[in-house]
Amino acid sequence: MPIWLKQAMTAPSKLRYVQRLRDSAKSNQVLLVNIATTVGVSATGDMLQQYSAYFTDRLKWDGRRTGHMATSGLTLGVASHVFYRWLDGALPARTPAVIAAKVLVDQAFSPVLLALFLATLAVLERVSWRQFVREAADKGPRLLAAELAVWPVAQTLNFRYVAPRYRLVYVNCVSLGLDVYSSGVKYGDTQTDGVAGPNRRAQKGSK
């Protein structure tokens, strides 16, 4: 067989290989951007919450707490990236029925992300399983209620107008306000047993 014919026959496979490399690079780039924005927004939300607390209670900024919130953004960023890739692949259309279905699935997945958020912080703070369960039961409903007030409308716009590769970036932009609220609920004035929270008690005692 002539060399030029062999080269012509192998050219399509080479092109497919190059295309797969490009697709993989784009996917990795999207993953990195999604993780970076989730981590950044989680940390920013906590810093804004602490900034507001400084003027009300004169509390010092807790860098470790912000680091914990940023780390929770890392786990949530990876989980959300995988989830939205699956969701857009399973329901790629933008018809009203498909958008409604995607919003319902997204809301059904919300408790999973909330549990992951609280579990990540529980591991970082080294709390016991019993404390984690009590905190989830006490603060989980408030956090879910806030998400139900925001995400159905926000995600309807997301699934209708935003390109899939920018899906999580849009979510992170919207969730900044929720992250401020989540930080306030997580590190509020009281714990589930009604005593002053450890972070706030320690900071007040240091003044």
Image: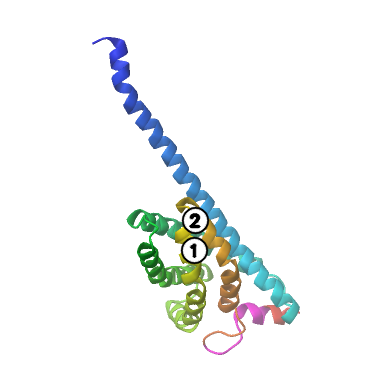
* Disc 1 and disc 2 in contact, CB within 8 angstroms: yes
Assign the C terminus to one quadrant of the image.
bottom right
* Front-most of residues 23 and 152: 152
* Front-most of residues 28 and 72: 28
Assign the N terminus to one quadrant of the image.
top left
The CA span between labels 1 and 2 is 7 Å
**Which residues are drawn in magenta?**
193-202
Q: Secondary structure at mark 1?
A: helix
Q: Secondary structure at mark 2?
A: loop
Residue matched to label 2 = 162
Residue 19 against residue 66 in the figure, above or below: above
Report the amino acid beneath label 2: Val
Instruction: Single out the residue that lies furthest toward the top.
Output: 2
- Colouring convention used in this rendered image of the protein: rainbow
Q: Is residue 58 left or right of residue 43?
A: right
Is residue 54 highlighted in magenta?
no
Residue drawn 61% across the image and 71% down it: 180
Residue 159 against residue 205 in the figure, above or below: above
Disc 2 crowd, CA 10 A, few/some/many (<14, 14-19, 20+): some
Between discs 1 and 2, the one toward the N terminus: 1
Residue matched to label 1 = 157
Q: Which mark is residue 191?
A: none
Residue drawn 47% across the image and 76% down it: 148
Residue 118 place in picture, x, y as percent: 48, 72
